[in-house]
Amino acid sequence: MTHWIIAPVILPALLAPILSYVMRHDITLARIASVVGTALLAVIAVGLIVMAADGETHVYRLGNWDAPFGIVLVLDRLSALMLMITAILANIVLIHAISTGWDDRGRHFHALFQFQLMGISGAFLTGDAFNLFVFFEVLLIASYGLMIHSGGRARMKAGLQYVVMNLGGSTLFLFALGALYAATGTLNIADLAVKVRELPLEEAALVRVAAMLLMIVFAIKAALFPVQFWLPHTYANAPAPVAALFAIMTKVGAYSIIRIYTVVFGPDVAATEGLIGTWLMPAAIVTIAVGAVGVLGARRLMPMLSFAVVGSMGTLMLAVSAFTPYATTTALYYLVHSTFSAAALFLLADLVVSRRGNDGLFAQKPTIQNGLFAALFFGSAIAMAGMPPLSGFLGKLLVLDALRPMSWMALGWTAILISSLVTIVGFARAGSNLFWKSTSMVPAVADDSDESDVSEVASQNTQHPATAWQIAPTIMALAVLVLLAAFAGRATEFFQGASDQLYNNSGYIDAVLAPGGDDVPASAENDLHTEETGH
C-alpha cells in the first residue's frame, strides 16, 4: 500500500492551518508556502497518474482496515486524471492570484485555497459515499470563504445564495445516504455495487429513491437544469481567480455522476435501469439551451462567461447521459477542455475588467494592451464555442459522434450545433464591443482639444500594462487546450482506458473488497509465517 495515494489530501490539509494561524500576517511567507505546496501537489499528481496508467485499481486502506468496514481511498485512471486537472488548474490560478494581488485582499486566501484543494482531491479519491458527502462539505465551506474574498455587498449576496442552495443539496445528500444504508447496509461504493445488484427488484424502491436524490444533489453541483440558476450569479460576482478555480467545482458533480452511475447504478442494474439516463438527457439539453441564450443575452462580461460554463456543462452531461464507454470517453475529453477554456476566459476577464473599470459589454475607450487582450480573448472564445483548431472543436465532434447510436441523436445534435452557433454570435458581439469598436473611440489629441479630452487620455495613460506573470496564466490555460488538440489521440487512449475501468468495474470492486493482502505490514506477515511453521 503506497502512502502517496493519500498525499493529495494530507498535503493541503496540513498546509492550510499553518497558513491560517502562522502566516496570515505575512503575505510573502504565505505566498511561498502556498506556491511550494501547490507545486508539490502537481508533482504528486504526476506520480499518481503514472501509477494509474498500468490499468490497475490501487487502494489505500486507512488504519489498514479492510473495506467495507474501514475507510478507503481508491486510485484508478479516472481519479488520477481528475487530480491532474485539479493540480494544473490550481497552479495556474495561484500564479494569477499572486501576480494580480488578489490574494492580498483578505488574510485567509491561501488557507482557504488549500482547504479547497483538500476537498476536491478527497472527493476524487474517496471510495465511500459518506466520505464523498464529507468532502463536499469541506468544498462548500472553503468555496464560500473564497467566494466572498475581499468583500462587497453583491459578493456577499451571491455567496449567501450559493450557500443556501448547496446546503439544500447537502440535506438531500444525507437523505439519499440514509435511504441507501437502510436498503443495503453499506455506503462503500464497491460494496454498494455488489449489494444493489443482489437486491430483489421488489425490494428496490428505496434504492430508486436514493438514486434520484443523489442525481439531484450532483445536478446541483454540476449546475444542471432546473437547479443551474445559482451558478451565473455566483461566478459573475466571485473574484476572477476564484471563478477560474470554480471551473473544476462543477466537474466534481460531473465526476460523481460518472462514478456512481456506472459503478453502483450502472446500465446493467435492474433496480435503476433507464431511470437516470431518461432524466439526465432532457436536463442536459435544456441546460445547453439556457447557457446559449444566456451568452447571447448577457450585457456584462462576467455573467456571459458564467452562462458559457452552464452551456458547456450541458454538453458534457449530454455525453455522460448516453452511459456507454465511448460516450464517457468523449465526455472526459470535453471535461478537460471545458475546465481550462473556462479558466482562461475568467483569468483574461480579470485583466480586462480591472483596466476598463467595469465589465459592461459596450464600447468605451480602449484599454492598454488592447491588441494583446483581443488576441487572447479570440483564442479563448473559439475554444469555448467549439471552433477549430483548438480542442473545443474536437471535443464537440467526438460528443456528436458518440451520440450517433442513441435514439435521441437528432435532438442532441440539434441542441449542440444550434447552441454552438448562438454562443459564437454572443462571443463575437462581446469581442467586437470590448476590443474592436473601442479602437474607434480614441480621442484625437490636437491643439484645440478641450480639457475633458485631455483628462480622458491621461486617464488611459495611467493604466498599468499587464506584466508577464499576469498574462502567463491565461496563456498557460490556452496552452493546455493546444496540447489537448495536438495530442488528442494519446489523450483519448488514456480516457478510453478510464472508461473501460468504469464499465468493467469488477477490477474496482475486487480491489476494494479484497482483504489487505500485500498491504499487510511485513511484521504481520512474519508473525503469520512464524505461527504457521512453528519457527
Image: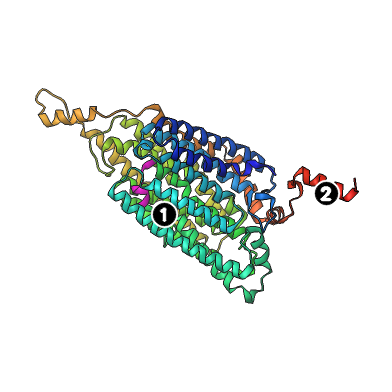
522 is higher (above) or lower (below) than 263: above
Decide which of tag 1 and tag 2 comes sooner along the chain: 1
- Category of crowding for the residue at label 2, using alpha-carbon neighbours closer than 10 angstroms: few (below 14), some (14–19), many (at least 20): few
Q: Secondary structure at mark 2?
A: helix
The residue range painted magenta reads 233-240
Graded by Cα atoms within 10 Å as few (under 14), some (14 to 19) or many (20 or more), the crowding at tag 1 reads some
Give the quarter of the image for residue 343.
top left
Residue 113 spot, x, y in % from top left? 45, 42
Q: Along the horizontal axis of the image, is 372 left or right of 2?
A: left
Pick out the residue farthest to the top: 447
In the image, what residue occupies the spot 62% across and 63% down? 267
Q: Residue furthest bottom?
A: 202
Q: Circle 1 — which element?
A: helix
Q: Is residue 375 magenta?
A: no
Question: Where is 116 relative to 414, above or below?
Answer: above
Badge 2 is on which residue? 528
Callout 1, which amino acid?
A: Ile
Question: In front: mark 1 or mark 2?
Answer: 2
Q: Pinpoint residue 191: horizontal percent, then vertical percent.
A: 66, 61
x and y percent of residue 142 in the render? 44, 48
Residue on which the image places disc 1: 418
Identify the image quadrant of the N terminus: top right
